Amino acid sequence: MTDFKSFFNGLNPVSDDSWEKLISLFKPRRLSKNEYFIKAGEQAKEIGFLESGIIRAFYRNNEGVEYNKHFFINPCFVGGYASLVTQKVNEINQEALSDCNLLVASYNEITGLYQTCPDIERAARVLSERFFVQKEQREIELVLLDAEKRYEIFRRDFPQLEQEIPQYHIASYLGITPTQLSRIRRKMAGL
Amino acid sequence: MTDFKSFFNGLNPVSDDSWEKLISLFKPRRLSKNEYFIKAGEQAKEIGFLESGIIRAFYRNNEGVEYNKHFFINPCFVGGYASLVTQKVNEINQEALSDCNLLVASYNEITGLYQTCPDIERAARVLSERFFVQKEQREIELVLLDAEKRYEIFRRDFPQLEQEIPQYHIASYLGITPTQLSRIRRKMAGL
DNA sequence: TTGATTTCTTTACCTATGTAAATGCATAGC
DNA sequence: GCTATGCATTTACATAGGTAAAGAAATCAA
């Protein structure tokens, strides 16, 4: 069984028929390092399943300050989810931090399956609920914990990542500057 | 049409039959000021529709520090949503800040309707997506904006609330102390 | 290997916000 | 009219974290 199928069945088990309909909508795509899956200002139309590689989702405000909202690593979906579900213009950039392999589908074609495949719509509901729970957790961490504790959580949540991406991306994920991350690292290193 | 019905149809229009099944699961409940709808440590089992009054949702950490995650005002659902969907122990307290009128149902009985009423499951999906979008927005505000800007957003999002609840609850919502909120208010007042 | 570039760390200084304690100011009972 | 209580503000001091600039280290390209 593919990564994708077992991931999807982990949301909600789907019938063979539903799975065939679903998987037929996805086409492979490669993303080279530094390429974007989606940019702010576009209308999100696609959703992707990340098979390998690292993608960062980040928000950039008017002054050009970036905030790394999330790092995607296999297995997971990528895409401008808020834009997909609200139909509004996407505000989140998603950039490959390494070469990536994806399976990509039109989001509209997937929602079209909801009519005939309630098991797929259920999986979509579970996915959405899961996203919400993640965000709620992160909100609490951002407000109640200081950067040092958030760094520890980052290392627990993304153990492989620390070696593979620059520290300024990690700092941005933690909501601090590389300067501050460096201070925290020195402090944690024991001095 | 009731508040509740029009709110629910705003998620996804449902058939008369589905609506009858759904509404029959809800019973009125009153909550006096300072009573809790749910407490941390319990298993969430109920979901409520808030008809009138104000409820705060807050997280309290081990040291007893509180963070006001959200204020509920009509029309909206209340309940330990993360706990309901994950079946894990609830970590969020929900306390009435004024006398409240609610309609309350067993969450399990509602999910039971999903089998026969796909229009209700669709509404649940839309609700979950809406929650996610709200959280994503709030996450960005928490990381990228300083407390003064968040205060302005609070006043825009909850214009009625500022007069009706103590400032320490507002400060907690903003992720700052009453001291700092007082400083910000003085500064904004123009001195 | 060398030079150029990118990343990481350090330093000095500054600002936002926290903590604790005191004060002021309402309002509700009595 | 008092007084207790709860809330908002203020003050003084401490800390986390930002900014800017320089230096060190690692990486990449020629």
Image: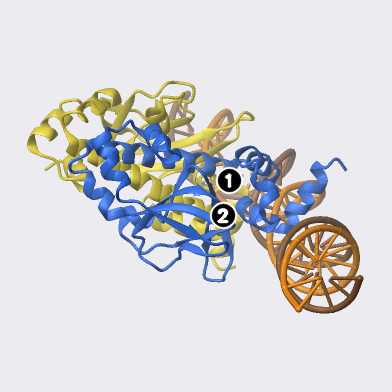
Chain colours: A blue, B yellow, C brown, D orange
Residue B144 lies left or right of residue D14; in this view the side is left
At x 57%, y 70%, the residue is A64
Q: Give the image location of residue C9, x and y in percent.
A: 83, 56
Q: Which residue is mark 1?
A: A142
Q: Secondary structure at mark 1?
A: helix
Q: What chain does badge 2 belong to?
A: B
Camera-side residue: A6 or B147? A6
Residue D2 x/y as whole percent: 57, 34
**On the image, numbered disc 2 is attached to which residue?**
B143
Q: Residue at x 57, y 56 (%)?
A: A68
- Name the kind of residue labelled 1 in the image: Leu
Marks 2 and 1 sit apart, C-alpha to C-alpha, by 8 Å
Q: Residue at x 45, y 26 (%)?
A: B90
Whether residue A107 is visible here, answered yes or no, is yes
- Which dot marks residue A18? none
Q: Nearer the viewer, residue A132 or A114?
A: A114
Give whichever of B125, B102 is nearer the camera: B125
Image height of B136 relative to B124, above or below: below
The three-letter code of the residue at mark 2 reads Val
Q: Are marks 2 and 1 in contact (CB under 8 Å)?
A: yes
User: Quarter of the image containing the N terminus of chain A?
Assistant: top left
- Asked whether, in this view, residue A63 is left or right of residue B82, the answer is right
Q: Residues within 10 Å of mark 1 (few under 14, many from 20)?
A: some
Q: Is there one chain holding both mark 2 and mark 1?
A: no
Quadrant containing the C terminus of chain A is top right
Q: Is residue A82 shown above or below B131?
A: below
Location of residue B123 in the rendering, given as x and y in whole percent from the top left corner: 24, 41
Kindly identify which chain the residue marked by label 1 belongs to: A
Expressed as whole percent of the image width and height from the top left, the position of residue B68 reads 49, 40
